[in-house]
Amino acid sequence: MHDAYEAIPILEKLPLQIEAVTAYDGNLVVGTRQGHLLMYTVTPGTTRRWDVALLCSNKNFSRKPIVQVAVIPEHQIIVSLSDNVVSVHDLTVFNLPLLCTMTQTKGATAFDLDIKHHVSLTGDAVVTVRLVVAVRRKLQLFYWKARKFHQLREDLALPDVPRALTWCMEAIAVAFKHEYWLVKLTGEQKELFATGRSQEPLITRMVDGEQLALAHDKETIFVNAAGNATCSYTLKWVEQPLALAYDKPYLIAILSKTIEIKTTEPQITVQVLNLDKPKLLVVGHSTKGKSQVYVASTSHVWCLHTIPISQQIPQLLAEKQFGLALKLVDVWDEAEDAKNQMQKHIQHLQAIHLFCSKKYPEAMELFFSLNTDLPFVIGMFPDMVPEEYRSRLRYPYPIPVLSGTDLEQALQSLVHFLLQIRPQLSISDSRLRTEDSTDSNFSSAAASLKSRNEKLQIIDTTLLKCYLQTNDSLVQPLLQKRDSRVSVVEGERVLRHAHKYAELVILLQTRGLHQRALQLLIRHAKRPDSPLIGHHHTVAYLQNLGPEHIDLIFEYGGWVLKLHPEDGLKIFIGDKSSLGEVDQLPRPKILNFLKKTEKSLVIPYLEHVIEEWGDTTPLLHNELIHQYRDLITAPHLSSDPADVEEEKGRRKIVHEKLLKFLNRSEYYTAATLLVHFPYDSLHEERAVLLGRLSQHHQALSIYINTLRDTQAALSYCQKHYTASGSGSEVYLMLLKLLVSPVEGKSPAGSPLKQQQTKQLDVETILELLQNYLHCIDLGQALKVLPDEVTVQLLKPFIHASLNCASTVCRQKQIARGLTQSLKLQTSEELVACQRLKILLSEYTYCAVCSKRFTKHSAFAWYPNGDIVHFSCQNQR
């Protein structure tokens, strides 16, 4: 406990018996059993005894006790209850004369005032007063206007005679002998709960009249204006209170022998005072916001003067009553800056105390709300900051050494704290919290970190250390974040210490330290106890480097190519699960590297690049053809018949690939390739290349004279025939070669196969003429045909050719006639259009803008006759 109030005698041994008291603005109003109404001025002195002077009195007001009295200073009136009637007195006159007696309240047992301050539409301050009076089993409602009370509404009937009543917003809390009720101004009534064994129930209004404290035996229950409980707990007293009053943040109760002062949250007993038989308790409010608590017995009055808050707060902090200290700051009569500074100071102490009390989540939440310096918070955890730095941090309480379950729980709370701060730093620099609000008492050694990057680095590095101790599965996602700022030096240290080499590789990779990462992978590739054993980690790493690190890829990918060629190739072509950056690597450089390092991978690489990625670079297409050719023409290295046969099978497959590729690809350069193809082999391939160069006669000569494959020659003609140009005579060239085969060498330089017969194949010639007569000129064909082919044999061909020529001629004549007819029709339309006259005068207006046409106006005419400006035609 601490001293919140000081009991100062105000009136002692008053010859009159006190029945009621109230106070306002340093004035004390007393109602006596003898019916006197007294008013004193109370002036604080320099000692415990204050100066009290009788300001005014009314000794002839009533011969009955004044059981209740209230003041409305804004309207300069006093309301009293005596002889079961409510009266109003004038406060401006010395003898407090009676303004009026409210005869309609005869039989009253209690009353309560509702005073509200408003601002009118004109900006003036307005004070409204409502009065409720308990008269037998009903409530009478009045409002103050023109120096008198007027009826507010009709009376509200009650089930019993009220013993106490209090305004609560737009409702009235009523205490009967056995229960509490809530009566709304609309007439709706709600039963709350029983009063308990108390014969004198108590109702006390709390903050701004929005909450009530209701006595229930030794407990106090808190309800709102709707009659619902506002707290899940009740405030307990050592015995049943005789009177209650609320002086924020304290609830004061008169018990049988003492005065007990408590707070509702936290529920603690603040102070206990011993006074001589107190029975009355009142809180006098001031227009300046200050309040004074008065306690009265039948002959004495004491003022419970509030101990200065600046003296109370240090006592509370010493007792670690931080919640109550914060409540006192709210009512502290100081400048806002001083209040804010004190509030943050208390909250920092509270947060550190919560941490020392093992309430880690609550402590971290409070640190977050205070925007406490990161090193100050992180320094409370072991091994989170360098020891030399941690030794310079100063904390108000000894920080416990965490271990075991406590350490794990604390680290989890720290992780949550850091993850709350990080998004605010990552969004933008404009949202960076640059104000350092850490209490100066605690931050003498904690340099304020103003850099966003530095703060992010501290957060991420600390998160890494926390994850390593609590949940190491989160380490990799943290390091792989695009904006991860884990310190390389500190991160490498803790990861090596924890033997997290895979995570260390990720850290080095994300920081661009690829050479160090690759060296680490090579060192661990052959360690059986390492998680990085094997070459697959190196392959995956190199796949994601990108073209700017091509030299690094070549440097550290060579050993994989030599020991594991198939997996090494994935460095440059990727795999099914991930393509990585390999499709962006410079392919000509890779080709040269493979030719020097592992030549067997050149063909698979080129096939993948061309077939899978659709590369159209002529260099790569040419190189693939060269590789195929070299593989086919290479000499056999083994004399073993089995090996020779196996090699022939492989070469046959490559031969088929080469021929297929030559026919399908459009991007190789045939002229440069042809000189590298031998004359004594790969004849069909040479023919394809010759065809690509439009050297059709030489190509057909290979098919007819070298390969003796007339069907292949026909397929060639079908592929290369065109209606005009060099391809228009391919069938005639084939006919000439069939008629006059060449002996010795073909025109292409390829050796000819030994002819088995010199007999002319007339049947093939006639079949060619019959099937492709539309592609062969009749005159040229007749010139090259030998004498063995008689006119009788050519008769069907000649008839068909003539019919074809006649058909073509008739089609041309029809086309000519149709063209001439279209020309005449167009000419007639032109003449009709030229005959049209458009007359523009000074009375001609645009159909869009309704303006006249000038002499130089460009215009547009519509078929319906509308004429518009040329610039208006798009607005029509």
Image (spheres, rainbow, N blue to C red):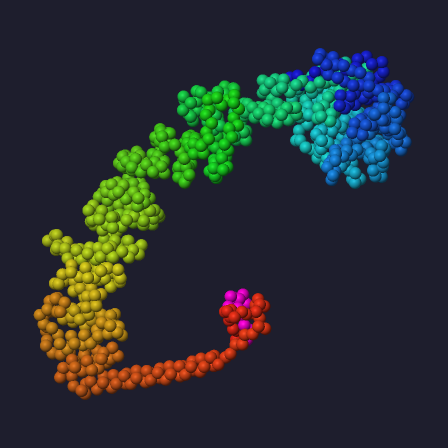
User: Left or right: 37 with respect to 718?
Assistant: right
Residue at the bottom extreme, as displayed: 792
The image quadrant of residue 351 is: top right
Residue 122, above or below 608: above
Which residue occupies the foreground of this view, 688 or 355?
688
Magenta region includes residue 81: no
User: Left or right: 795 with respect to 189?
Assistant: left
> In this rendering, does residue 157 appear at all?
no
Residue at the front extreme, as displayed: 855
| Image spot of residue 813 (x, y percent) | 33, 84
Residue 131, above or below 704: above
Residue 845, above or below 113: below
| Image spot of residue 565 (x, y percent) | 24, 46
Magenta span: 864-876
Q: Residue at x 79, y 20 (%)?
A: 28
| Image spot of residue 79 (x, y percent) | 83, 27
Q: Quadrant of the N terminus?
A: top right
Q: How many marks?
A: 0
Q: Residue at x 25, y 70 (%)?
A: 719
Residue 545, above or below 678: above
Which residue occupies the foreground of this view, 722 or 700?
722
> In this rendering, does residue 675 appear at all?
yes
Q: Residue at x 83, y 38 (%)?
A: 152
The image quadrant of residue 132 is: top right
Which residue occupies the foreground of this view, 267 or 717?
717
Q: Quadrant of the C terminus?
A: bottom right
| Image spot of residue 765 (x, y percent) | 18, 79
Which residue occupies the foreground of this view, 357 or 351?
351
User: Left or right: 412 with respect to 489?
Assistant: right
